[in-house]
Image: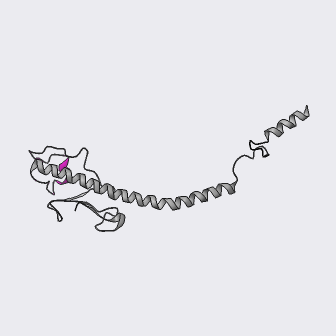
Amino acid sequence: MMMDCDVNTEILATVDNGKRQRPGQAGFSLIELLIVLIILGLLASLVGPRMFGKLEMAKQKTAKAQIEMLLTALETYRLDVGRYPGNNEGLDALVRNPGEDKWDGPYLAKQVPLDPWDAPYFYMNPGEHGEVDVYSFGADKQPGGEGENSDVVSW
């Protein structure tokens, strides 16, 4: 009878792969966990900067697409009203009638969007580079700059 009990204990202490373990020794060692964390850290340090670079490039492209959308809406406004909105009316005239009889808007489906860096787009009429200028100062919110800080403009 005593022998049956020893055999059962022996069976319980054997893992599926055939190696013997003492009960309560399942899991990973601290060294194994540290190695995995180091490998994950190295992968993140290699992939992370590339992903952030893509994010900033995507923001620049989004700003350019939004400026094109605003220019299209401004052109439609001009065709209806006969002129572009004045500086005092700004881009808000694309969603709210500034008191024009010929206004047939709204010319945008939603409110005037903020640029991808959560700042309003700048609008000038007359523009320095065209009939109207629409632009964003980029990530640094300052004129000029390079890379992610470069201005996104309509000209």
Q: Residue at x 10, y 49 (%)?
A: 81
Name of the residue lying farthest toward the top:
1
Pinpoint residue 30: horizontal percent, then vertical percent.
69, 55
**Residue 11 appearing in the image:** yes
Residue, x 9% and y 45% (percent of image)? 102
How many numbered callouts?
0
Q: Quick one: quadrant of the N terminus?
A: top right
25 left or right of 121 in image:
right
Q: Is residue 48 left or right of residue 141?
A: right
Q: Magenta includes 59?
A: no
Q: Where's residue 21, x and y in %? A: 78, 46
At which x and y percent is residue 63? 30, 56
Which quadrant would residue 32 be assigned to in this image? bottom right
Q: Is residue 127 left or right of residue 139?
A: left
Q: Tell me which residue sits at (40%, 57%) in the image.
A: 55
Q: Main secondary structure of the magenta part?
A: loop
Above or below for 94 versus 135: above
Instruction: Report the residue that reaches farthest toward the front.
Output: 17
Report x, y in % for residue 80.
11, 47
- Residue 118 visible, this angle: no
Coloring scheme used: one colour
Picture layout, residue 93 above or below residue 140: above
Where does the C terminus fall, quadrant-wise? bottom left
Using the image as rendered, state which of residue 96 and residue 13 is in the foreground.
13
Q: Which residues are magenta?
A: 83-103
Of all residues shown, which one is farthest toward the bottom? 145
Q: Does the magenta run of residues contain 94?
A: yes
